[in-house]
Amino acid sequence: MNNERFESYSEITEKEIGQALDFAYQHIRKYVPEFTRSFQNAYSENNFYKPIPNNYWTTGFWTGEIWLAYEYSQDEVLKKAAEVQVQSFLERIDQKIEVDHHDMGFLYSPSCVAAYKLTGNQKGWEAAVKAADQLITRFHDVGQFIQAWGPMNASENYRLIIDCLLNLPLLYWASEETGETHYKEIADQHIHTAINNVIREDYSTWHTFFFDMETGQPDHGETCQGYKNDSAWARGQAWGIYGCALAYKYLKDDRYIQLFENVTQYYLNHLPKDLVPYWDLTFTDGSDEPRDSSSASIAACGLLEMAKYVDSKKAKTYQSIAKKMMKSLVSHYAVTDHEMSNGLVLHSTYSNRTPYNTCDHKGVDECNIWGDYFYMEALTRLYTDWNLYW
């Protein structure tokens, strides 16, 4: 990986990492009374999250922030708040409240798998296994993939999206915990199908990829949330970085190391000077388009994960780039006053409507909940030898 461009940048220091985590802990501690029996919305409005019930695909990230803050602080107030939310996740999967989609990993890994790993919480274990059972109901033998959204018998929904690579660790965890191999087998098949199709020849990535419903053959890629079909949606490219790292973690297939390098290099080549991307990698310095700070945190987590599996020289390079990206986030994007926002990181973009895509317009230049979570995860990875929730 070519690191020459980044040689002049400073890495975040151990002191800065500790200070950023301490602020995040204090911030979550301040706002957790408001968000214990409710959850922070997917995106802020004027930099403040509104409370929502546990009925959206993003609520697991807020619980994940609480668990990360508990790991840092060992504050029993946070543990008790997270346990209240684990009970809510068990009720949600039992009652099948908004679970007919592929985001069971986003919901249940940072909430319930985390609870079990950290405290042995049996409700967390039960909820996460049930979530894994729900996730595999969306697997198609014809095409060998987990369908993202919508009714399973409609050709317009016969697709996967790149985000799903982060949902699959739930299946590997369930397979290890239960001894049932079908979870792992489905995850393996989806990884192979996804990575073989969502990565383009130039190593940019499709957001979503369609398959023929009758034959399962690859059909075409397009975007829902990127600027347009032939552009590279910044958060999607970051999902590709972290997703390739996790694919290697679970499959130990050396092809995924090279794919990781290529997907990451494309991302790095399209970063602006401060190393935090615009919402689509088409845009760079001088653009008035909004940023997506969440993408930088996700990419940093992927770099730090892959650093575990490569030789020391590559590992040092990956770690250094991640530290430089986190330096920029902490210095220029993080919330620094408890009263200015109830989120952690400013200037994220959830969904930016253009003439060329089909997404809703919301959460543009705001905090978003996964951005806050992965920011904390990246800092935690740099602070300690972290046992990941994924």
Image: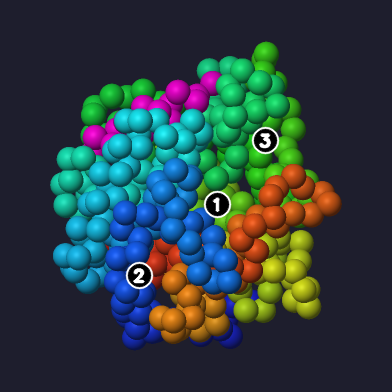
Mark 1, residues whose alpha carbon is within 10 Å: few (<14), some, or many (≥20)? many
Give the residue pinned by disc 1: 239
Boundaries of the magenta span:
125-140
Kindly state the secondary structure of the residue where label 2 is placed.
helix
- Per the model, the C-alpha gap separating discs 3 and 1 is 14 Å
Q: Horizontal placement of 28 versus 267: left or right?
A: left
Kindly state the secondary structure of the residue where label 1 is placed.
helix
Looking at the picture, how far across and down is residue 63, in whole percent? 34, 55
Amino acid type at image mark 3: Phe
Q: Is residue 199 above or below residue 30?
A: above
Give the residue pinned by disc 3: 209
The quadrant of the rendering that contains the N terminus is bottom right
Amino acid type at image mark 2: Tyr
Nearer the observer: mark 1 or 2; the answer is 2
For the stretch drawn in magenta, the main secondary structure is helix
Give the residue pinned by disc 2: 31
Which mark is first along the chain, 2 or 1?
2
Q: Horizontal placement of 319 versus 380: left or right?
A: right
- Per the model, the C-alpha gap separating discs 1 and 2 is 28 Å
Residue plotted at (70% across, 27% down): 156
- Is the Cβ of the residue at disc 2 closer than 8 Å to that at disc 3? no
Residue 351 image-quadrant placement: bottom right
Kindly state the secondary structure of the residue where label 3 is placed.
strand
Amino acid type at image mark 1: Trp
Give the camera-side residue of 315 and 45: 45
Label number found at residue 340: none
Q: Is residue 130 above or below residue 152?
A: below
Q: Is residue 233 visible in the rendered structure shown here?
A: no
Which mark is first along the chain, 3 or 2?
2
Residue plotted at (56% across, 34% down): 148
Looking at the picture, how far across and down is residue 166, in whole percent? 47, 45
- Asked whether 126 falls inside the magenta stretch, the response is yes
